[in-house]
C-alpha cells in the first residue's frame, strides 16, 4: 500500500486532520511589519507524521505556533479536526526545544501537571508513571529536572505532552539542543511512541536525516516569507533503515530543495 492510499484510509476512518487554508502572517508593529508566511495551504490527514524544514526565519515555528493557537494568521484559516484554532487547548500538545519543565517539580509531578490542568484527580500519579515508563524514565520519577541530563529532561517533556492524550502533537525542534547520540536515541523513541499513540504530529526540524527517519511527508519551505516549495512523500517502509538506497536519495533531494539546486518531486 502506498503513502497516498494509507492517507486516504486513515482519513476515512478517523476524520479530518489539519487544514491550513491560504494562511499568511505578518508580525511586528505597523511600521516594522515582517511578512513571515505567504499563502500557505496544507492538508495533513489525521494520524500522519509530517515534518517541516526550511531556512532559518522562514516561518516554520510561526506556523507551529498558529497550529497551537499561540498566534493568529493575518489572512486565511486553520482548523484542526474541523474546528477553527483560536486559542491553545489540551487537545493540542506542544513540545519545545527548551524542555520547559518546572524546576521545582519532580519528573512525575511535571508529567502530572497537564493532567491536573484537565481536572484529572483519580489515578493521576499512576497515569503519569505509566507514561514515564513508556519513555524509559520509570526509575527517575522522583528526581528534579536539574538532576537529569538534557535527553532525560526532553523525555519528561514528551511524557508530559503524551499524558494528556492529545489528538495533535506539535514539536518545535525538540532535539535541537541534544548531542548526536542522545538525538538518535530520542529520535527512535519518538518514532516508536507515535506508532503506539497514533497522534497527528507536526514536527519542525532543520535536520533532513531526522525528517526522513520520522516523517510520512516532509514540507519544504522557501526563505522568508515562507511559501511551500515542495511536499515530499517519504516512501520508505518502517522501521526505516538508513542503509536503504532510497534513504540517501531522499536526503539528497531534500538538501537540494533547501539549497535551490533541485526543484519538484523525486
Image (tube, grey):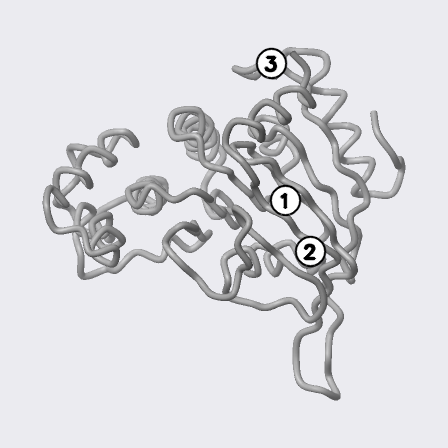
Which structural element holds mark 1? loop
Q: Residues within 10 Å of mark 3 (few under 14, many from 20)?
A: few
- The first of marks 1 and 3 along the sequence is 1
Select label 1 or label 3 by which is in front. 3
| Foreground tag (3 vs 2) | 3
Q: Which mark is residue 206?
A: 1
- The crowding category of the residue bearing disc 1, from other C-alpha atoms within 10 Å (few below 14, some 14 to 19, many at least 20), is some
Q: Where does the N terminus fall, quadrant-wise?
A: top right
Q: Is residue 207 left or right of residue 38?
A: left
Asked whether 26 or 15 is in front, the reply is 15
Q: Are marks 3 and 2 in contact (CB under 8 Å)?
A: no
Q: Is residue 134 above or below residue 173?
A: above
Which residue shows up at 55% across the image and 49% down it? 82
Task: Give coordinates of residue 133: x percent, y percent.
Answer: 22, 30
Residue at 57 percent across and 60 percent down: it is 66
Tell me: 264 left or right of 35: right
As drawn, the label of residue 237 is 3
Name the residue furthest bottom: 31
First-in-chain label (3 vs 2):
2
Quadrant hosting residue 104: bottom left
Quarter of the image with the C terminus in it: top right
* Residue at x 55%, y 26% (from the top left corner): 10
Question: Mark 2 near mark 1, Cβ–Cβ under 8 Å?
Answer: yes
| Element marked by disc 2 | loop
Measured as percent of width and height from the top left, residue 53 is found at: 67, 44
Q: Provide residue 67's location: percent of width, then percent of height.
A: 55, 55
Mark number for residue 56? 2
Alpha carbons under labels 1 and 3: distance apart: 23 Å
Amino acid at each position: 500500500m502506498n503513502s497516498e492510499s494509507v492517507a486516504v484510509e486513515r482519513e476515512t476512518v478517523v476524520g479530518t486532520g489539519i487544514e491550513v487554508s491560504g494562511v499568511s502572517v505578518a508580525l511586528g508593529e505597523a511600521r516594522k511589519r515582517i511578512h513571515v508566511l505567504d499563502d500557505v495551504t496544507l492538508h495533513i490527514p489525521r494520524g500522519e507524521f509530517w515534518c517541516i524544514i526550511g531556512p532559518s526565519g522562514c516561518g516554520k515555528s510561526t506556523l507551529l505556533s498558529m497550529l497551537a493557537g499561540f498566534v493568529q494568521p493575518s489572512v486565511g484559516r486553520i482548523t484542526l479536526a474541523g474546528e477553527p484554532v483560536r486559542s491553545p487547548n489540551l487537545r493540542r500538545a506542544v513540545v519545545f526545544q527548551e524542555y520547559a519543565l518546572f524546576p521545582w517539580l519532580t519528573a512525575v509531578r511535571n508529567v502530572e501537571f497537564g493532567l491536573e490542568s484537565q481536572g484529572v484527580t483519580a489515578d493521576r500519579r499512576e497515569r503519569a508513571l505509566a507514561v514515564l515508563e513508556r519513555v524509559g524514565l520509570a526509575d527517575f520519577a522522583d528526581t528534579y529536572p536539574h538532576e537529569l541530563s538534557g535527553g532525560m529532561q526532553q523525555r519528561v517533556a514528551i511524557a508530559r505532552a503524551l499524558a494528556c492524550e492529545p489528538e495533535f502533537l506539535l514539536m518545535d525542534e525538540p532535539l535541537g539542543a541534544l548531542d548526536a547520540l542522545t538525538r538518535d536515541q530520542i529520535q527512535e523513541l519518538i518514532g516508536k511512541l507515535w506508532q503506539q499513540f497514533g497522534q497527528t504530529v507536526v514536527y519542525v526540524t532543520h535536520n533532513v536525516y531526522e525528517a526522513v527517519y520520522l516523517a510520512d511527508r516532509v514540507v519544504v519551505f522557501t526563505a522568508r516569507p515562507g511559501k511551500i516549495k515542495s511536499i515530499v512523500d517519504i516512501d520508505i517502509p518502517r522501521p526505516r533503515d538508513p542503509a536503504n538506497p532510497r534513504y540517501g536519495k531522499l536526503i539528497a533531494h531534500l538538501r537540494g530543495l533547501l539549497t535551490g539546486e533541485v526543484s519538484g518531486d523525486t
